[in-house]
Amino acid sequence: MTSLAGKTLFITGSTRGIGKAIALRAAADGANVAIVGKTAEPHAKLPGTVFSTAEEIEAAGGKALACVTDVRDENQIASAVQQTLEAFGQLDILVNNASAIFLAGTLDTPAKRFDLMHSVNVRATFMASQRCLPHLVKSENPHILNLSPPLNMEARWFAPHVAYTMSKFGMSMCVLGMAEELREQGVAVNALWPKTVIATAAVQNLLGGDAMMRCSRKPSIVADAAHAILTRDSRHCTGNFFVDEEVLTSEGITDFEQYAVSPGEPLMPDFFL
């Protein structure tokens, strides 16, 4: 399978950044996409809403459903899943992209930030997987894809920001466990992580501004890698911790300059690699 035409994707955190890029790439194939996010009204510092993104999905060739959802609430997740089924009649792919970030040491991490990261990153990933699973097993090529890093259990990844690393590795541990749990049912569960920093609102607003953006790649590189993974046979592609550039290299892509925000600028490696 090389196309997502007719497939239904449920993508959390898809109003902007990587989630939106994955949605638009699927839409180019003619996929159905549930845009799952909590931004219903325009935000002063963050681009896009679930409704404006849904319009872009339609313009790109897909069918869209805007689901205003706080992924910290399992009842809202359940409602979004039900809306997706009512709109499209099926659910083939779950992309757990929604994520919260706060990079600070132990003494400088407030409880509310700790709770936010673990609620959005770990808990929402688990609950969305749980709610989607009864419907995914009915698909002929079901996939769960978590935007989370390889499980490199080294102190250097934890020391600067223990709480954040725990939450992202929690998403990866869902991959490790669920891939084996769901193997016989044919549900693929994989992780995908970028080799370099990706130009997103988080990078612009929290991680270095314009200088960091110039050392970043566009979200489209992750979207293209996700597309390559999600079109693979779910029974033979599971339990992997993929890196975007490695996926695309395996697909025969050699021109990575096309993904650079500022071609020729040195790229900043991402966390955890």
Image (cartoon, rainbow, N blue to C red):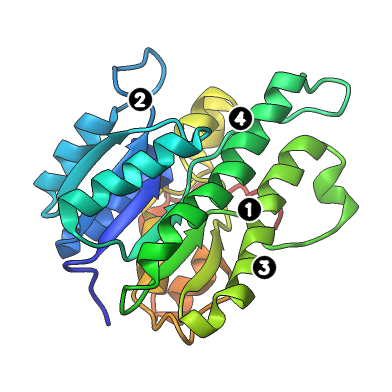
Q: Nearer the viewer, residue 168 or 235?
A: 235
Position of 69 relative to 261 (above/below)? above
Say which amino acid is labelled 4.
Leu
Say which amino acid is labelled 3.
Gly
Separation of residues labelled 4 and 3 (CA atoms): 31 Å
Which residue position holds label 3?
A: 177
**Answer yes or no: do the residues labelled 1 and 2 have beta carbons within 8 Å?**
no
Is label 1 in a helix, a strand or a loop? helix
Image quarter where the N terminus lies is bottom left
With 35 as the anchor, is 256 left or right in this view? Answer: right
* Earlier sequence position, callout 3 versus callout 2: 2
Which residue position holds label 2?
A: 39
Query: Tag count in the figure?
Result: 4
Position of 155 relative to 224 (above/below)? above
* Earlier sequence position, callout 3 versus callout 1: 1
**Residue 240 picture quarter:** bottom right
Residue at 53% of width from left, 26% of height from top? 209
